[in-house]
Image (cartoon, rainbow, N blue to C red):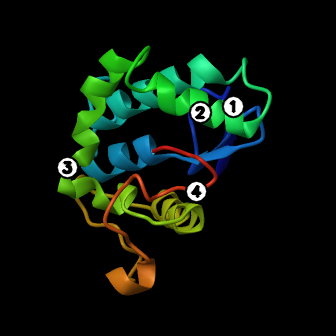
Amino acid sequence: MFSTFDEPSYGAIILLSNGSRLTNISGCIALVDGDESATGCGAKDQAYQECRDTACISGCATFEAYDQCWVAAGPTVCSPQREGAVCWRRPSYAICTSYNTSDESFIAMAKIFCVSGLDGGTTIDSGMSKEDAGEAETREAALTDGEDP
């Protein structure tokens, strides 16, 4: 379920070298649509996230500095990847992107990554209602601790 930033593939939660963690929304997107190719939405979103991480991970001693850099990198140095990753906004990916807190996102990713036999396009809800699963309306509200999906 856990992986580190330097591994070739990721689990539900990605641990960064600065001590912060990210939920693997890109991997969730690839699982939901069944497209793990380099041109799939999950791969495009991953390229955008990795661009931001690479721009900030080594030069930021504190989480606050990393967070500020990460937010600033999106529309600047990572603009080309950002444009390619806009596909994450599709309603079919709400199961991956719509959480208010880091805890809600963490639990959702664990359920999604730990279930077997996924079909592309399947709604993955582990048998819980939307109210029980804690789904929110926006991806931006998905993570706390300064994480930007």
Tell me the SS state at disc 2: helix
In what element is the residue under mark 4?
A: loop
Residue at (51% x, 62% y) in the render: 105
Q: CA distance from mark 1 to mark 4?
A: 15 Å
Tell me, yes or no, whether the two marked residues, 1 and 2, touch with CB atoms within 8 Å: yes
- Examine the rendering and report whether any part of residue 83 can be seen: yes
Q: Earlier in the sequence, mark 3 or mark 4?
A: 3
Query: Given the image, on which type of amino acid does mark 2 rest?
Result: Gln
Q: Is residue 3 above or below residue 95?
A: above
Q: What residue is shown with label 1?
A: 65
**Dot 4 surroundings within 10 Å: few (below 14), some, or many (20 or more)?**
some
Q: Relative to residue 64, is residue 81 drawn left or right?
A: left
Q: CA distance from mark 4 to mark 2?
A: 14 Å
Q: Position of residue 146 (x, y in %)?
A: 59, 47
Q: How many marks?
A: 4
Q: Which numbered circle lies on residue 144? A: 4
- Residue corresponding to mark 2: 68
